[in-house]
Image (cartoon, grey):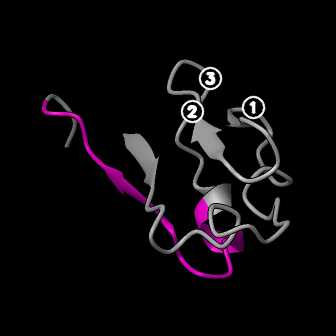
């Protein structure tokens, strides 16, 4: 599973201080480049989905890799 952030929906990307996706991430896979640019580290992300349930604007989505069912 590959998680990605839709920056058109992400309020942090719009300049609002929001770390709702980072806080529940038990793998520290969500990093911030500055205060307003969240990035998902694919090497750390285990696909738990906690970030999706906490995002107030539902800006995080995922796609399955080709070899996953």
Residue drawn at x 73%, y 53% as measured from the top left: 36
> In terms of sequence position, does the residue under pointer 2 or pointer 1 come before the other?
1
Instruction: Give the SS element for disc 1.
Output: loop
**In the rendered structure, are the residues bearing label 1 and label 3 in contact, judged by CB atoms less than 8 Å apart?**
yes
**In the rendered structure, are the residues bearing label 2 and label 1 in contact, judged by CB atoms less than 8 Å apart?**
yes
Write down the residue under mark 2. 46
Q: Which residue is situated farthest in the top direction here?
A: 43
Residue drawn at x 66%, y 47% as measured from the top left: 37
Whole-angstrom CA distance, mark 2 to mark 1, is 7 Å
Q: Position of residue 5 (x, y in %)?
A: 48, 55
Residue drawn at x 75%, y 31% as measured from the top left: 27
Q: Which residues are magenta?
A: 52-66
Write down the residue under mark 3. 44
**In the rendered structure, are the residues bearing label 3 and label 2 in contact, judged by CB atoms less than 8 Å apart?**
yes
Q: Quadrant of residue 12?
A: bottom right
Instruction: Give the SS element for disc 3.
Output: loop
Quadrant for the C terminus in the image: top left
Instruction: Indicate whether residue 62 is drawn in magenta.
Output: yes
Residue drawn at x 79%, y 65% as measured from the top left: 20
Q: Image height check: is 41 above or below 20?
A: above
Circle 2 crowding by C-alpha within 10 Å: few under 14, some 14–19, many from 20: some
Q: Quadrant of residue 51?
A: bottom right
Whole-angstrom CA distance, mark 3 to mark 2, is 6 Å
Write down the residue under mark 1. 27
Instruction: Indicate whether residue 63 is drawn in magenta.
Output: yes
């Amino acid at each position: 599973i590959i998680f990605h952030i839709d920056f058109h929906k992400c309020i942090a990307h719009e300049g609002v201080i929001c770390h709702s996706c980072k806080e529940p991430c038990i793998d520290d896979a969500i990093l911030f480049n500055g205060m307003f640019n969240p990035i998902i580290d694919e090497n750390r992300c285990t696909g738990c989905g906690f970030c999706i349930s906490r995002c107030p604007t539902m800006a995080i989505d995922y796609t399955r890799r080709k070899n996953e069912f």
